Amino acid sequence: MRYDVVVAGGGVAGVAAAVGAARAGASACVIESGGSLGGTATQALVTPFMKWVSGGKPVVAGVFAVVLKRLVESGGADEREPAIFEPELLKVVLLEMCEEAGVDVLFNARVVGAEVEAGGLKAVLASTKRGALRVEGLSFVDATGDADLAALAGAPVAAGRESDGLVQPVTLMFKVAGIDFERFAEYLERHPEEAAPWVSVEHVRRAVGEGRPFSFAGLYRLVAETRAEGEFPEIPGIGYIAPLAAFPREGYAVFNNTRVCEVDPLDPRQLARATLEAYRQALAIVRFLKKRVPGFERCYLAQLGCRIGVRESRRIVGEYVLKLEDLVSCVEFPDAIARGCYAVDVHPLKPGEKGLWIPVPEGKSYTIPYRSLVPLKVDRLLAAGRCISAEHAALGAVRVMPTAMATGQAAGVAAALSAASGVPPRRLSAEEVRRELVKQGAML
């Protein structure tokens, strides 16, 4: 098999890369280890798109904007709350977009090898039900999230915090159904102090009345009381309840309330143990909800994420390493190929530590340079999503899905231009990449 652009990984970044490459005129394929597109968004139940609007204006568009539009049209998101989406319908939207763009999608195919010739990546090897599959390309995009392809090709990679190699904790999202949201909203109206500072109780009340999705975090007093009685699970840094995607019309919510620290997401045994621990945490949270939270008396566990959510693992070392200060200062890079506005959000790496939260001022955004997509040492390869070249703390901001889709589209466009011209990505004109991205509706 041979394509102009080969994308490893079918998460949202990989889909954006493949669609971006196809729109730039390249033949493209996506090699995905699972049986659906969307990665963390669809397989791990991470159903809210984190912040992409600053000061009332979007800073991420392009393929991401098309996905949002298609989700709303399909009933997979409410146009009034487009950040919260139905993962099952997102699977459909992403696969249809690939089909319409002419992208070949290979499911249940895991990249396990790389062929490098004269310093440039020539082909990838994938394991499938029919045996080994060799896929040749002119350019490649690593959208695996874990920099799998880059590592296999011999590109320099880094992992975790610079001082000790620890990565952010893993979290298993879970769905709870059978919720009486009317009763829950009434409780919040009587106890507004139980809502997190960023939550408007009035907004929750309105959303419940109109049957539209909302996000919530809080219930600090109920958690503290239950913990004092020895009945709340000991989850590092969790003193609240967070149904980040609540669907009152359907009577269910997806919770972001498990956390397992000091896990190497590249170690299969550690990942299995962490998943079991997260399962137990989720079951304990459901017991707490049923016993203590008004509106949850008849709730039940409806679904555990098909896989645990990984915030951070391995990343490339690129032509430029994106720094925390670049984001805090909202640096405008001349070779910017994407924007973001999500806060620097680093969860506690081990029990007892504090996390890091540095919000971006409203109306401002930061940029990501093209050089952060280009790995050192290996040619004909780019990175996208959460495995781009960035410091540990900086990755805490740019790892989220809207920004990942922006870097994915940029990597796909650059790969297509490189394939067409024969110019390696590291020598490609960033301005040429920027021009094509603007043509595709991206915001730079």
Image: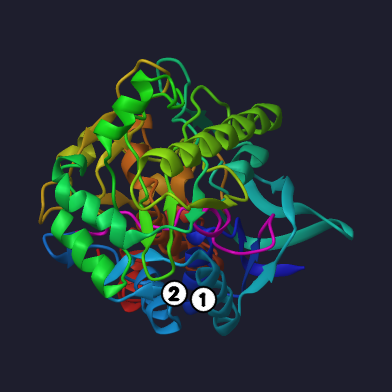
Label 1 secondary element: helix
The quarter of the displayed image where residue 9 is located = bottom right
Quadrant location, the C terminus: bottom left
Q: Name the residue under label 1.
A: 93
341 with respect to 429 (left or right) = left
Name above or below for residue 51 compared with residue 422. above
106 with respect to 195 (left or right) = right
Front: mark 1 or 2: 2
**Residue 202 in sight here:** yes
7 with respect to 178 (left or right) = right
Mark linked to residue 76: 2
Between 399 and 259, the one lying in front of the other is 259
Assess disc 1: are there few (<14), some (14-19) or many (≥20) residues with their C-alpha within 10 Å of its C-alpha: many
Give the image location of residue 43, x and y in percent. 58, 55
Q: Which residue is drawn at 24% across and 34% down?
A: 357
Say what amino acid the circle numbered 1 marks.
Answer: Val
Between 325 and 34, the one lying in front of the other is 34
Q: Give the range drawn in magenta.
A: 32-53
Say what amino acid the circle numbered 2 marks.
Answer: Gly
226 with respect to 146 (left or right) = left
Between 230 and 244, the one lying in front of the other is 230
